[in-house]
Image (spheres, rainbow, N blue to C red):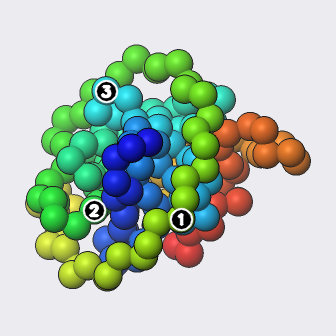
Amino acid sequence: MSAPPMPLYDQTTVLRAWWIGDCVFDVELRWIAFIYDGHAFSAGHDTAWLGPARGGLMMDSSGRIVLWTPDVAIVGDVSPYRPARPARPPRPERPLRPNLPPNPYKPARPSDGWSKLSLREWFGVGAVKVVQDDSVAGISPNEITFDD
């Protein structure tokens, strides 16, 4: 995880997650997704496909933007394809907490609109319950700390 952390915001400019290397962590730095071949997959045992992930954008399965990082063009993917499910990578080490970035400007509305999924729904697509010792990657939708 040598790449600098990229803050991921929702359409209202609320910081929701961090994209660090090929991993996505929630704001509490819990591993919730991984990136493989330009796509985001749940960190849960089912490794469910969440949607395309490229250029600082996280999209849903219809190609609409769920999360974005500043300094990128807010453009969805008009016809994403469902890739083959990859093997789940080993659980990454929890990163150091990144410094909070300044709040970005509200982005322009994408031409095809924002995702209709809430973040809880999007991350919950492939979420699994955490066992008490937190040895299973992924979290249940009820444990996600988003305020949507």
Residue positioned 68% across, 49% down in the render: 139
Q: Element type at marker 1?
A: loop
Q: Amino acid at mark 2?
A: Thr
Is 110 above or below relative to 51?
Answer: below
In this view of the protein, which residue sits in the foreground, 107 or 98?
A: 98
Residue positioned 42% across, 76% down in the render: 100
Nearer to us: label 2 or label 1? 1
Q: Quadrant of the N terminus?
A: top left
Give the residue number, with chain letter if any, for mark 1. 97
Nearer to us: label 3 or label 1? 1
In the rendered image, residue 72, in percent from the top left (x then y), is placed at 15, 59
Q: Which mark is residue 69?
A: 2
10 Å neighbourhood of mark 3: few (<14), some, or many (≥20)? few
Is 9 above or below relative to 5?
Answer: below
Side of 109 relative to 36 (left or right): left
Residue positioned 39% across, 44% down in the render: 2
Q: Amino acid at mark 1?
A: Arg
Q: Which mark is residue 37?
A: 3
Residue positioned 26% across, 52% down in the render: 56
Q: Is tag 2's residue or tag 1's residue first in the polypeptide sequence?
A: 2
In the rendered image, residue 22, in percent from the top left (x then y), is placed at 40, 38
Alpha-carbon span between mark 3 and mark 2: 19 Å
